[in-house]
Image (cartoon, rainbow, N blue to C red):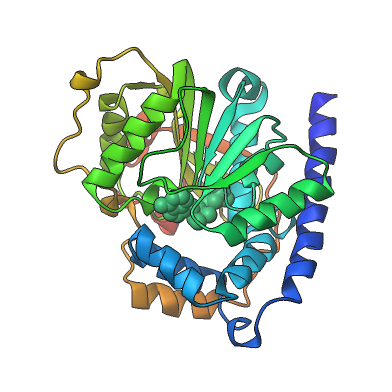
Amino acid sequence: MIEIKRIETVKEWYKACKKAAAILYKTIPETYKSRTFYGIIGDIKALPSKKALSLISRKKGLGTQFAYLYLNHGIDEGKGYQACAAEALTSILGKRKYKIIKGQVLDVGCAVGVTAGILSLENVTGFDLFTDLLSAAQSVNSFTNRTNKFIAADMTKDWPFGTCFDTIVCGLVCHYLKTQSEVVTFFSNAYRVLKRHGSLVITMPSGSISKTSDLDNLFDAVEKSGFKVKRELSGLVLSTDSSHSLFWMFLIIAEKVPAKVSDIFIHPDFAFPQYRTPLTREEKGAQARKTVTKKRKVKHEDFKLITAGELKKKVSNTILDYSTVVQL
Ligand SMILES: C[S@@+](CC[C@H](N)C(=O)[O-])C[C@H]1O[C@@H](n2cnc3c(N)ncnc32)[C@H](O)[C@@H]1O
C-alpha cells in the first residue's frame, strides 16, 4: 500500500518537473539553448566552486538552461541518469528506507530536489551551489504542495547548519570534491551536522570509481571521518531489467559513530579526483556532443546490489567499465 502511494507521488513529481521545465524553457536566451546537459556539467566540474558560481552568474540565462536540462534530461520522467540513481537507491533500500532515511534529512547538492521528490520524503532541507536549480526545485515543490526547503550553500565551505539532522543524503555529489581539503571539509561538516547514530547515504556515478580497491579506499576515508560503513548495503548497484541500457552507480551507507574529532585522520593521499571519470574536459565535451540526441528510452525498474566484498571476489583487479559491469 505504501509502495503504491509512493509510485503515485513520484509520478506526480515527474509531471511537476515537466511543467516547471516548460515554464523555464520560455525564459532561456537563444544563445544558450544549444548548450548540452553534460557540457554544462563538464564546465562546472572542471572549475573550483567559486569560479563555477561566477561562470553561471556572469552568463545570465545559462543557469536557466542548466535547470531546464536537469528537469528534462537528468530527470526525464525517471529515464534520466540522475532520476534513475534515486530510483535505484529506493529499490535497494526497500523497506529499510524508513530505518535509514529518517527524521530531518539534509540533501547535499540537491539540484532540483531529486532525492526528496523520488524517495517521497518530507522534512527535507536541500542545498546546492546554483540558485537556478534551487528555484526549479521550489517551483516543482509548489506544484506538488510539498514543504521541503531549498537553500543556496557551498559544500566546500562551512555548512550553515547546527547538529540537527538525522540523515544526510549526497546523491551523485561527492565526485565534485576536488582537493583533499575539500574532502576533509565535507566529511567534518557531515559529521558535525548529523545527530548521534545519524545516517550518511552517498551515491557516486558510474565511471567515478574504476577499481574495487578505490571503493575500499573510499570506505576507509568515510570511516576515518567518524562513520561506520554498513558493508552489507554498500557496493555497486546495477540495473537488471534491460540488457540494451545498462545503469550502474556506487552506494555507500554509513552511520555516525561517536568519535573524538582529534581521532579523525584522512590519509594525505586521499582526494576525490581519483574518483572522477578519467576523461579529460575535451573528451567529455566530445562525448556529450555525441550523446546529446541519445536519450535513454528505458525507465529501469529492477536493480541489484553487489556488495564491495562480493565485487572483490568477482572482479578484484579489473577496471569497472561497461564491459565488466554488464557481465556481473
Ligand atoms: C550530479 S548532480 C546531483 C544532484 C542530485 N543530488 C541528484 O541526485 O540528482 C550534482 C549536484 O551537486 C551540485 N554541486 C556541485 N558542487 C557543489 C558545491 N560546491 N556545493 C553545493 N552543491 C554543489 C551541483 O550543482 C549539482 O546539482
Q: Position of residue 88 (x, y in %)?
A: 61, 41
Quadrant in the picture for residue 97? top right
State left or right for residue 215 relative to residue 265: right
Task: Please say if 49 is above or below 145.
Answer: below
Task: Please say if 144 is above or below 52.
Answer: above
Of 157 and 262, the residue lying toward us? 157
Quadrant in the picture for residue 269? top left
Task: Please say if 307 is above or below 178.
Answer: above
- Residue located 81% across and 25% down the image: 2
State left or right for residue 6 relative to residue 244: right
State left or right for residue 193 relative to residue 317: right
Of 315 and 133, the residue lying toward us? 133
Of 301 and 79, the residue lying toward us? 79
- In this view, the residue farthest toward the bottom is 31
- Residue located 50% across and 31% down the image: 168
Q: Position of residue 262 (x, y in %)?
A: 19, 20
- Residue located 37% across and 26% down the image: 191
- Residue located 67% across and 29% down the image: 123
Q: Position of residue 42 (x, y in %)?
A: 43, 68
Q: Position of residue 213 (x, y in %)?
A: 26, 40
